[in-house]
Amino acid sequence: MPDLSALTFARPWLILLLPLALLVWWRLPAGVRSAPRVPFADAWRAAADTRVLSGLLHWRGVLMLLAWLLLVLAVMRPQVPGDRDNILLTGRQMMLLVDLSLSMSIPDMRVDGQETDRLTAVKAILEDFIPDREGDQIGLIVFGSQAYVHVPVTPDLATVARLADEMEIGMAGPRTALGEALALGVIHLAETRTARAGDEQVMILLSDGAQTIGSVFPREAGILARDRNITIHTIGFGTEDGGPLGSPSDIDEPALIAIAETTGGEYFRAQSSEDLLAIYRTIDQLEPVEANERYIRHARDVWHWPAGLALMLILVSALPAALVIRRPGVRS
């Protein structure tokens, strides 16, 4: 039997169902309420002593009432604390913003000696960066012509890394809504901010171009982030000459610098995968992971206890029909 001292309910509002049994009883015809019909009731009246039958019907009503109470408790989903998981958890929430516009397909990067496109280089760096942030809560916003939350902030870094690897060029449209991505990150972090003192919220923006679409200007989004105590580190990515295709990055460096400075962050310029790796290592030093170990305790459902007990009471309430024995001398 679970410890009930810390019992909670996932759906406590369902206690409003409790009076339903009385309402149904009140709506029944008066004759049915005064003389409830039960299986074999006519046989009981012919075979059993009136006092015995009256007592059995009374206790049957009590048992059914208790069964209803237990069923309502069951649907309220009672829970007790379950197993404890020790985790490294800081107060920091970090949102990664990754440009997926068509220019990220330019193959001017090298990863492990192989020529590759910009997005593949970003994925290779994030593959190491994300797992090393154990203790932080990390989310991912992707943007092109639109911006959307690809992964909400979560301490499940394995999921973040897996979904980051599934990013595809153009999945958010071909253009660059830089300001929209920043504004979405600010809104999402503001909605997920916890009440703990000392919480930190950080955004890391990576883009290889300037804003080409959107109604929110990047610098305005930077002011919005500053007003909500969110630090933004910005990364301008891509070579000057654009590699073999000769399509250089059209980075709006003044805007990226202004965003970082406005929020107390840093601006970085990366022209190779090695530069990008060094930048993420620098960000690791700017935003160190704290080693404070905390724990979370998962809730364990125990609805089956009241549900099982209710079933037992219902079965017991049906027993009197089989237990009433005709007494000698009772008229049939």
Image (cartoon, rainbow, N blue to C red):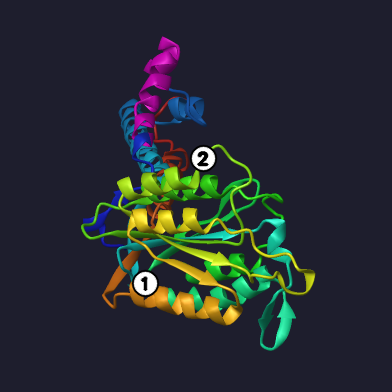
Work out how far the residue at label 1 is from the one at label 2, CA to CA, in angstroms. 32 Å
Horizontal side of 75 relative to 19 (left or right) equals right
**Of the residues tagged 1 and 2, which is closer to the observer?**
2
145 shown above or below 59: below
Q: Nearer the viewer, residue 281 or 299?
A: 281
Residue 221 lies in what quarter of the image?
A: top left
Residue 209 in the image: state x and y as whole percent. 61, 57
Sequence-wise first label, 1 or 2: 1
Label 1 is placed on what type of residue?
Answer: Gly
Q: Nearer the viewer, residue 215 or 160?
A: 215
Q: Residue at x 68, y 49 (%)?
A: 175
Q: Nearer the viewer, residue 48 or 199?
A: 199
Q: Residue furthest bottom?
A: 113
Residue 12 in the image: state x and y as whole percent. 34, 40
Residue 259 lies in what quarter of the image?
A: bottom left
Q: Residue at x 23, y 60 (%)?
A: 198
Q: Which mark is residue 216?
A: 2
Q: Which residues are magenta?
A: 14-35
187 shown above or below 204: above
Q: Is residue 115 magenta?
A: no
109 shown above or below 228: below
Residue 164 shows up from this direction: yes
Horizontal side of 181 relative to 221 (left or right) equals right
Other-residue count near label 2 (Cα within 10 Å), few / some / many at <14 / 14–19 / ≥20: some
Q: Is residue 21 magenta?
A: yes
Q: Which mark is residue 135?
A: 1
